[in-house]
Structure formats: C-alpha cells, structure tokens
Image (cartoon, rainbow, N blue to C red):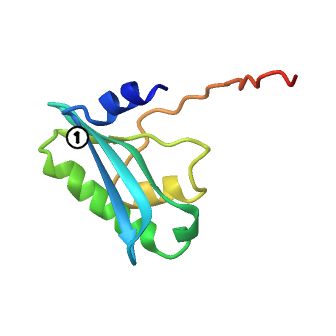
Amino acid sequence: MPDEELSEKINAANIDIFLMSVNNSTAGYAEFIKTPDYTEILYFGLLPAYIGKGLGKFFLRWAIGQAWSYGPKWIQLNTCQLDHPHALENYQKNGFHIVRTETHQRRVLLPAHS
C-alpha cells in the first residue's frame, strides 16, 4: 500500500491507534474504529517478546475500557487462527461472546523467482 494511502487510513477521524509501552519499549498496540453504533477493536496484540508475561489480560481490559469510552451501543472484536492460541478464551473471559463463525480459504501468491 502506498504511504499516502496508509496515512489517510490511519489518520481518519474515526480511527484511534494506541501503543502500550513497557520500560520505554513498544510492547503492544490497539486500533479502534469508531462508529455511531459500535466500536470495533480492529487490531489488538502484543509483540512477541511480551507474550506470556501476563500483559495481555491487562492490555485487553484497558482496550475494552477505551472502546466503551467512545459511547457505543456495543463493541466488536474479531479473531482468527493467526491469533494467539489463548486469545479467544481471553476475549470470552472478558465478556465477549461468539456471534458468528466463518471459514475462509485464502491463497497466497508468491512472485516467481527469476
């Protein structure tokens, strides 16, 4: 994606992005999409060096509080098999419910070697 297009997307008025720092190092991130009806936690995660240290629970609770602070009717969070194996369990322990399950098959096209 060209830099200009990326800049427009992440600087849109309905997007908020936060970084979590530990000892002045970035440990995680959360991106929110705000709409009149709901807030979507679009991206949420920890960098690999910070996984397994108990930070995910703390950061998720913070992200949920931040999402509610926008005044939505509900909060949406999607997950997939690329997420940490305990992500879904953590989301459910913090009040999220499975609304729908979908299976998508995707192909990744690699450029031919010269």
Task: Relative to 80, say whether 103 is above or below.
Answer: above
Name the amino acid type tagged 1: Trp
Decide if residue 52 is on the left or right side of residue 73: right
Picture quadrant where residue 58 is located: bottom left
Location of residue 66 in the rendering, given as x and y in whole percent from the top left corner:
22, 54
The residue carrying pointer 1 sits among few (fewer than 14), some (14 to 19) or many (20 or more) residues within 10 Å by Cα, namely few
Q: Position of residue 53 (x, y in %)?
A: 51, 76
Residue at the limit of the structure toward the left, as seen here: 71
Residue at 61% of width from left, 56% of height from top? 85
- Residue 19 sits in which quadrant? bottom left
Which structural element holds mark 1? strand
Residue at point 71%, 26% (across, down): 108
Image x and y of residue 11, in percent = 26, 35
Q: Is residue 18 left or right of residue 6?
A: left
Question: Label 1, on which residue?
Answer: 74
Viewer-proximal residue among 86 and 23: 23
* The C terminus: image quadrant: top right
Residue appearing at x 52%, y 61% in the figure: 47
13 with respect to 102 (left or right): left
Please name whichever residue, 74 or 14, is drawn nearer the observer in this view of the structure: 14
State the residue lying farthest toward the right.
Answer: 114
Q: Residue 80 location, x and y as percent? A: 55, 41
Total numbered badges shown on the rendered structure = 1
